């Protein structure tokens, strides 16, 4: 029996009405065809400013997966979760915009998040997406070592300046800044930038952290090379480990452009790769701090067991766990209950602008084997438990 099955702990913050609403929503999400139709309809109605749709979204998907429309509104959720020893990672969840004005606004928002997180144990990390600071196309051209036009060179300098400004501020405020991972055809350009920031700002400890997608091939070799460089140049490494979220897109592009598939051949290989990363970092805690971002119960328990075998305290500052807000509360709240360093990714932003993020969440729940079924089973179990208490 899983150690993560205590629904009383898992849903301590949720009213029965909220559980019933979540049950309805995950019931809808479990049907891929229905989800696809719903997403298409949602994107169309939001794009065309249909009346009342925004309110419907706010009271359903948004309420389930987001903290609020602003950092301040989300603070209520932050304080509530922190009562259960669960931190919040502010995620300014604006996606799909590619103009310089939006990039500058996003950069400023991340800086404000860093200032907000300073000295606040309820917000252990701040995060940003690389495509929040620059165009995907530009990263791709850099990765391919293409000759840039003068205007593209200026654009890239602005991207680098945004990274520098937020990492510098994070260093000054002693706040960990994590950089999310994206598609493989731009990720190396991101990695190079992040490694440059690590070398500059991680001399005393890991302030700048990268994200490693373990569904990709070659990641352990990448970690080994990173560690060797960090040892030679005497700086610390910080990593968030995830399985990955772009599998179908990655496979389709590799097939279309006829290059080797960058994704592990099957789920078992991905799981083995993730667990190998757990082993790797726990054997190099002198140089590496880690955040295990996973909804997989087995990988989470494996990391906990490894910590125990090394006589590490549950709240060792170098080891963190995290899940997305609105999902896998059974894992996060159990970890918080046992005083591990547990956090939730807490997206926020104007409802209309967050729709691309929300549709991605819905699609991922549909495509990840067993995820929606597990959420539904836990919700039903807790609703039934509460009924029996009456």
Image (cartoon, rainbow, N blue to C red):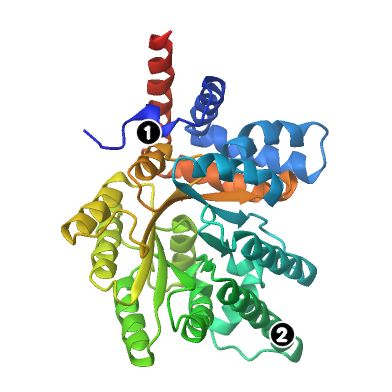
Quarter of image, res 57: top right
Task: Please report the residue visible at 38 percent of the width from the left and 52 percent of the height from the top.
Answer: 294
Q: Earlier in the sequence, mark 2 or mark 1?
A: 2
For the residues labelled 2 and 1, the Cα–Cα distance comes to: 46 Å
Residue 69 circle label: none
Q: Is residue 220 above or below residue 358?
A: below
* Residue mark closest to the camera, 2 vs 1: 1
In the rendered image, residue 257, in percent from the top left (x then y), is placed at 49, 72
Quarter of image, res 288: bottom left
Q: Is residue 277 above or below residue 145?
A: above
Q: Looking at this view, is 225 or 318 the one in front?
A: 318
Q: Are marks 2 and 1 in contact (CB under 8 Å)?
A: no
In the rendered image, residue 198, in percent from the top left (x then y), is placed at 48, 80
Task: Please report the residue visible at 64 percent of the width from the left and 54 percent of the height from the top.
Answer: 93
In the rendered image, residue 32, in percent from the top left (x then y), is placed at 50, 36
Residue 152 circle label: 2
Q: Is residue 264 left or right of residue 31?
A: left
Q: Residues within 10 Å of mark 1 (few under 14, many from 20)?
A: some
Q: Label 1: which residue?
A: 374
SS assignment at label 1: helix
Residue 369 appears in the figure: no
Q: Residues within 10 Å of mark 2 (few under 14, many from 20)?
A: some
Task: Please report the residue visible at 57 percent of the width from the left and 43 percent of the height from the top.
Answer: 79
Quarter of the C terminus within the rendering: top left
Q: Looking at this view, is 232 or 46 the one in front?
A: 232
Q: Looking at this view, is 302 or 173 the one in front?
A: 173
SS assignment at label 2: helix
In the rendered image, residue 289, in percent from the top left (x then y), is placed at 37, 69
Quarter of image, res 80: top right
**Outermost residue, left direction?**
309
């Amino acid at each position: 029996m899983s150690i993560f099955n205590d629904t009383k702990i898992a849903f301590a913050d949720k009213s029965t009405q909220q559980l019933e609403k979540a049950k309805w929503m995950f019931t809808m999400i479990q049907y891929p065809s229905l989800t696809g139709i719903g997403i298409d309809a949602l994107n169309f109605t939001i794009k065309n400013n249909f009346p009342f749709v925004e309110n419907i979204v706010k009271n359903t998907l948004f309420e389930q997966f987001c903290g609020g429309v602003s950092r301040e509104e989300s603070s209520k959720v932050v304080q509530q979760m922190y009562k259960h020893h669960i931190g919040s990672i502010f995620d300014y969840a604006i996606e799909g915009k590619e103009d310089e004005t939006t990039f500058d606004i996003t950069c400023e928002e991340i800086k404000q998040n860093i200032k907000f997180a300073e000295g606040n144990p309820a917000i252990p990390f701040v995060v940003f997406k690389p495509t929040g600071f620059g165009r995907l196309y530009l990263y791709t051209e850099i990765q391919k070592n293409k000759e840039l036009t003068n205007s593209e060179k200026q654009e890239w300098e602005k991207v680098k300046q945004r990274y520098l400004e937020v990492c510098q501020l994070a260093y000054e405020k002693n706040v960990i800044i994590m950089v999310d991972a994206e598609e493989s055809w731009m990720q190396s350009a991101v990695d190079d930038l992040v490694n440059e920031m690590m070398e500059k700002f991680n001399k005393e400890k890991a302030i700048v952290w990268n994200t490693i997608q373990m569904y990709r091939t070659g990641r352990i070799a990448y970690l080994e090379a990173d560690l060797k460089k960090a040892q030679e140049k005497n700086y610390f490494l910080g990593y968030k480990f995830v399985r990955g979220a772009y599998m179908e897109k990655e496979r389709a592009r590799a097939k279309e452009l006829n290059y080797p598939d960058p994704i592990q051949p099957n789920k078992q290989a991905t799981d083995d790769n993730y667990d190998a990363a757990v082993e790797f970092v726990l054997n190099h805690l002198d140089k590496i701090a880690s955040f295990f971002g996973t909804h997989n119960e087995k990988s989470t328990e494996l990391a906990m067991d490894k910590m125990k075998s090394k006589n590490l305290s549950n709240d060792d500052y170098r080891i963190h766990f995290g899940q997305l807000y609105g999902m896998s509360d059974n894992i996060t709240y159990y970890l918080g209950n046992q005083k591990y360093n547990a956090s939730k990714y807490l997206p926020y932003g104007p409802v209309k602008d967050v729709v691309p993020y929300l549709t991605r969440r819905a699609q991922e729940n549909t495509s990840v084997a067993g995820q929606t079924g597990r959420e539904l089973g836990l919700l039903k179990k807790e609703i039934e438990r509460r009924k029996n208490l009456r």
